[in-house]
Amino acid sequence: MRAAIVILALVGMGCTAKEAGVSGDAEHLRRQLAKLAPAEIHADLSRLEPAKRQLVLKLVQASRYMDEIFLRQVYARNPEIRDELMRRRDPLDSLRLEYFRVMFGPFDRLEEDRPFLGDKAKPLGANFYPEDLTREEFARWLESHSQDREAFESNFTVIRRRGDSLVAVPYSEEYRHLLEPAARILEEAAQLAENASLKRYLLTRAEAFRTNDYFESDLAWMDLDDPDIEFVIGPYEVYEDRLFGYKAAFEAFVTLIDREETAKLSIIYGYLDELERNLPIPDPYKNLSRGRSSPIRVVNEVFSAGDTKAGVQTTAFNLPNDERVREAKGSKKVLLRNVAGAKFEKCWRPITARVLCADQLPLASFNAYFTHTLLHEVSHGLGPGMIRLPDGRTTTVNKELKETYPTIEETKADVLGMYNALFLVNKGVFPPAFRDSLFVTYLGGMFRSIRFGTQEAHGLANLIQFNFLREKKAFLYDEETARFRVDRDRLPEAIRELAHEVLMIQARLDYEGARGFIRKYGTMPAELQAALGRLTDIPIDIRPVYPIEAEFPER
């Protein structure tokens, strides 16, 4: 049954969503929306010259097309569901439409993708594959059509049925009606750009939208050094593809550089080689040949779109994900300071006040939270990436770990963020007293992240870390107060052990090992469940409100 017909049936027949076996009733939707605290995301555009401000508006305009593409990537019926909700004037449908827009579809990202409209489960492969495609059918097709492997496993194709056959359709063809206008706007923005590196990125990315080849424009993005603007747009993260973890979702970030904060953190840039050499794995598995350009930017977000805006908001990103680009130039780490600050005040601080032991609570700080976020992104660029197999074929960790990759990679980045922070404390980059602040802040942050839901890679990764470190008695539970604390003596070694485990899963391309590791540590313990139950009135995350959107007509 088509989703739009389901909506009509629920409303037209006079039955509530709850009575129909779904969770789209008004009371439930209001509770879910309350979990995402509205937060105005301010960035100071007044310092820009008029032409540059006009350029930023063009970037926002192009980025809005990423919302439309991602909507279609999530679920095939999304456009018709949205259109039907927009046509109706019932207050309940207005509420449904509001939550639909936050979630980019009828599936609740805060509740493991349960449908809040209709009763149809979200396909594991989203709309990147036919809904009925299984992993076994995909594998059988490639066994008998080996010439299709590269296109089928590409980050930038969708898989469709044509008669009895499966075909790979390039994004440039599947989404041409949206990519072409976005490309034209990027070209218009390039005409306003005085900075040569920004102009080159905009023009090469516009070309990539038409050719489906993102390599040159990713290289151009790594070289982007405009003094005011940091901007990225295109298909990147593969988290939406839970069937294989192959297909990249479209997103965009329009940001302004915080020069002062960027200068403070750029000292870490000089330690990247040492961080790689210090990884707790044998030297043959270390990636000492990967490019080390790796610029770090602290920015304030003006606007975001697509994948990054769905449900829980991004605090930082580390791109590009193409291992060829990382081999050549490394990756760029971008931290969204205004977004991080909003999350810290509206969610993080009130959560930790209820779950951490009173004597350790004062050690938690925004500085430690923001530093760990930075080192999380740095750590995405460390460790195994592109690997040569015994038969001479070159592959990547992403491709071989399939649907387990997002969770394993997020676990790696989190725990290596702490491992590397301790290394930098020992090097004198951070003061010794910062160590305990990092420890307590790391534990406190897990409660916020696990609330994202264990169907989401970041939430599941934090649950894995929590269980592993509890097993090692590095996190302790006080039954009398029902609060948690850090064992500051045990935690460093436990962090090293967890980093080793996850890095070796990646280095050995151990898909079955990844599945077993996630099964073992990805379950919810009773004490943690009870703690999360005491947080239900605290927002899980923020719902961004971008003042700049007032300058564009409502879709």
Image: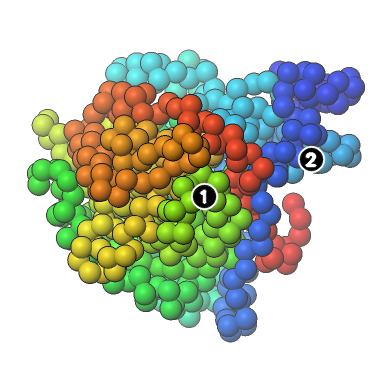
Determine the residue positioned at 24% across, 63% down. Answer: 424
- Checking the image for residue 368, the label placed there is none
Q: At numbered mark 1, what does the secondary structure look like: helix, strand or loop?
A: helix
Amino acid type of the residue that numbered disc 2 sits on in the rendered structure: Leu
As drawn, is 29 to the left or to the right of 54? Answer: right
Q: Which residue is mark 2?
A: 95
Q: Position of residue 327 (x, y in %)?
A: 23, 54
Q: Which is nearer the eye, 201 or 165?
A: 201
| Disc 2 residue crowd, few under 14, some 14–19, many 20+, Cα 10 Å | some
In 3D space, how far apart are the residues under numbered discs 2 and 1 (Cα atoms)? 31 Å
Q: Quadrant of residue 549?
A: bottom right
- Checking the image for residue 352, the label placed there is 1
Determine the residue positioned at 58% across, 26% down. Answer: 122
Amino acid type of the residue that numbered disc 1 sits on in the rendered structure: Thr
Q: Position of residue 243 (x, y in %)?
A: 44, 27
Determine the residue positioned at 28% across, 23% down. Answer: 512
Q: Position of residue 379 (x, y in %)?
A: 30, 52
- In the image, residue 332 sits, relative to residue 505, either above or below, namely below
Q: Position of residue 45 (x, y in %)?
A: 61, 76
Please report whichever mark, 2 or 1, sits nearer to the chain's N-terminal start: 2
As drawn, is 497 to the left or to the right of 24? Answer: left
Q: Are marks 2 and 1 in contact (CB under 8 Å)?
A: no
Q: Which is nearer the eye, 329 or 478?
A: 478
